[in-house]
Image (tube, coloured by chain):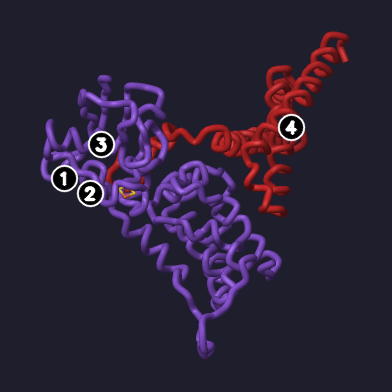
Amino acid sequence: MQVTVKILRYNPEKDEKQHYESYQVEADPTDRVLDLLEKIKGYQDGTLAFRRSCAHGICGSCAMRINGRNRLACKTLVQDLNTTKITVEPLLGLRVIKDLVVDMEIFFEHYRAVKPYFVNDEPPPEKERLQSPEERERFDDTTKCILCGACTTSCPSFWANRNYLGPAAIVAAHRFIFDSRDRAAAERLKILSDHFGVYHCHTIYNCTDACPRGIQVTKAIGEVKKAIMTGSLD
Amino acid sequence: MSLDGSVGLQWLRYRGGGTMLAWLLHRLTGLGIVLFVGTHVIAAFFLQQLGSDLAITITAIYESWAFQVIVYFCVIYHVINGLRIIILDLWPQLLEYQHEAIWLQWFIIIPIYGLSIFVLIQHGLIGG
Ligand code: FES
């Protein structure tokens, strides 16, 4: 089948602003949008810039707006879009470096701000720090994050104020806050109760719909809000 | 479209679906309520402080059918959507059913709003 791919492009060396360019591509229904971008770059226009690495929905490099919604290009099949006209644009709310490549620095700055690592200064036990299956289950959903940025850049609160830590950072914090082995929950909750923390979330739910890993992002944010409100992790 | 990351009006083209619409309507209906209360306050100000006829004109506007139909929607939507948000804030485990919650709220809003408008029209027709 013949597909029209319209891409929002920008070359900092010659363009003053972004503009759309369209490409006709021969595609199979089971092709992914990433395959189409590869075909365009390989056979029609080698200057097209986009990020990709694993091509299997694991590395989180290829998040972009596809037909108006954030998705991973490597996980989005042409047949699932139900149209032969595909519009591809860079993520919203981040500075565009070139074409579909955006500057993720602010995203990772927010990520680092919530201490996304295991903290426990108690002397390590002889073997491992044991955890029951139930305790492990408590934060299982938020371990799935691949830091693609689809959630944060789909959030109207983030669009309005980029100081807001954003859903991805809160998901990362949730993963450690509810880990029974971790000891820095109070510290993280304090960071998240700050002006630019969880209360910027207005349960708009775009983040959950955008997450390519199916993480219940709004629920995780809700659990963090409740933990701040009640002072309890139960 | 902007390159520095500021979103401008591009956000209007984001396909957030029903949940984003629910949030947008919450903001708009909130503004509608502020506008309604504002016209009341302004009318009262003109009437009491200045004894101006403008008060009668403003009162005629907010008591008009068209205005009332919009205000009813604003209040009913804002209250029920607000309740949904409060319930989900208190029981975050229910957030998994956010889409169902939105459907449920429309099932509540539409009959209540329809009934209110019916009463409003009937009231208007018999000259109440
Ligand atoms: S290329 Fe790795 S997630 Fe798409």
Is residue A142 shown to the viewer in this render? yes
Mark-to-mark CA distance, 4 and 3: 48 Å
User: Residue B14: x, y in percent?
Assistant: 43, 35
Q: Which chain is purple?
A: A
The answer to whether tags 1 and 3 share a subunit is: yes
Q: Residues at badges 2 and 3 in contact (C-beta under 8 Å)?
A: no
Q: Which chain is red?
A: B
In the image, is A143 to the left or to the right of A84?
Answer: right
Q: Nearer the viewer, mark 2 or mark 4?
A: 2
Residue A35 tag number: 3
Mark-to-mark CA distance, 1 and 3: 25 Å
Q: Residues at badges 1 and 2 in contact (C-beta under 8 Å)?
A: yes
Badge 2 or badge 3: first in the primary sequence: 3
Please tell me how crowded label 1 is: few (under 14), some (14-19), or many (20+) other residues with Cα within 10 Å.
some
Mark-to-mark CA distance, 2 and 4: 45 Å
Secondary structure of residue under mark 3: helix
User: Residue A117: x, y in percent?
Assistant: 45, 72
List the residue tagged with mark 2: A97
In the image, is A44 to the left or to the right of A137?
Answer: left
List the residue tagged with mark 4: B76
